[in-house]
Image (tube, rainbow, N blue to C red):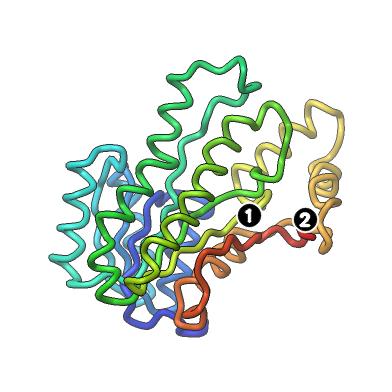
Amino acid sequence: MIPLLTDKVIVLSGVGPGLGRALGEQAALMGADLVLVSRTERRLEKMAALVREHGRRALVVPTDITDEDSRRRLVDATLEEFGRVDCLINNAFGIPPMDPITTLELDGLRAAQETNVFAPLRLSALFADALAESKGSIIMLNSCVVYSSQPEYSGYKLSKGTLEHLASSLATELGPRGIRVNSVAPSYIYEDVNKAYFDWIAQETGRTHEEVYAEKAEPTDLKRLATPDEVANAALFLASDLASAVTGVMLNVDCGEFHV
């Protein structure tokens, strides 16, 4: 692995299976130290052990990112342990209601926005001073759902569309302080959750898993789906010094499904 992130300190929210795990492991392989953030301490400790296996430091900070006091404790713990922050990766995600938007209860949408929009906003604001010192960056994990008009994805699109505009606004506001803000938008990621989803579709429609995969991959130029490591590597490029002049962009990592 190319050491693109040697000795950088990365705060990663949304540590979990799939993309969260890939982001943490790939960052460690690239030489970064990690601050690991989610509600579940057991999951964090498991990820920390993996980071340490790769010879990097890991700080476990169980955090409810929807709570302001908890967010402030995260910032304090990070700076006490490492004294610096080079990148904040906002990967945590709360699944919005999956029905047509005119049928949705507002409480469900509000709950999703707290995790998907307001938490990244506040974490970005709270880490801004430290990121300004390091000339660091913020990365938002977005989704190619922003290009979809399917009614059942409307709440999902609302969250991610708002996050896209938030990232753009932060790039403009924080840019004069030397902070870059970018987004990564995967389409279907071929990981355990989607593998199980494809199995369910196959069972419901009398097809094989491979046939469902081929259907989902057909709209892409490469005729395949991205892996968690591939999405993580694209995101971490944006955290590296190779992207020092890149800000305000949303990078699709979708094997060529959406482009002009």
Q: Which residue is mark 1?
A: 186
Q: Nearer the viewer, residue 73 or 244?
A: 244
Picture quadrant of residue 220: bottom right
Determine the residue positioned at 37% across, 52% down: 13
Determine the residue positioned at 52% across, 55% down: 19
Q: Nearer the viewer, residue 69 or 44?
A: 69
Identify the amino acid type marked 1.
Pro
Image spot of residue 33 (x, y percent): 32, 72
Disc 2 crowd, CA 10 A, few/some/many (<14, 14-19, 20+): many
Find residue 257 and name its label: 2
Q: Is residue 204 above or below residue 94?
A: above
**What is the distance, in whole Å, between disc 2 and disc 1 at their CAs?**
10 Å
Image spot of residue 136 (x, y percent): 35, 72
Q: Secondary structure at mark 2?
A: loop
Determine the residue positioned at 84% across, 28% down: 205
Disc 1 crowd, CA 10 A, few/some/many (<14, 14-19, 20+): many
Image spot of residue 10 (x, y percent): 34, 67
Q: Is 140 on the left or on the right of 144, as rendered? A: left
Q: Secondary structure at mark 1?
A: strand
Q: Is 126 on the left or on the right of 8, as rendered? A: left
Q: Is residue 145 above or below residue 19?
A: above
Identify the amino acid type marked 2.
Glu
Q: Is residue 118 above or below residue 255?
A: above
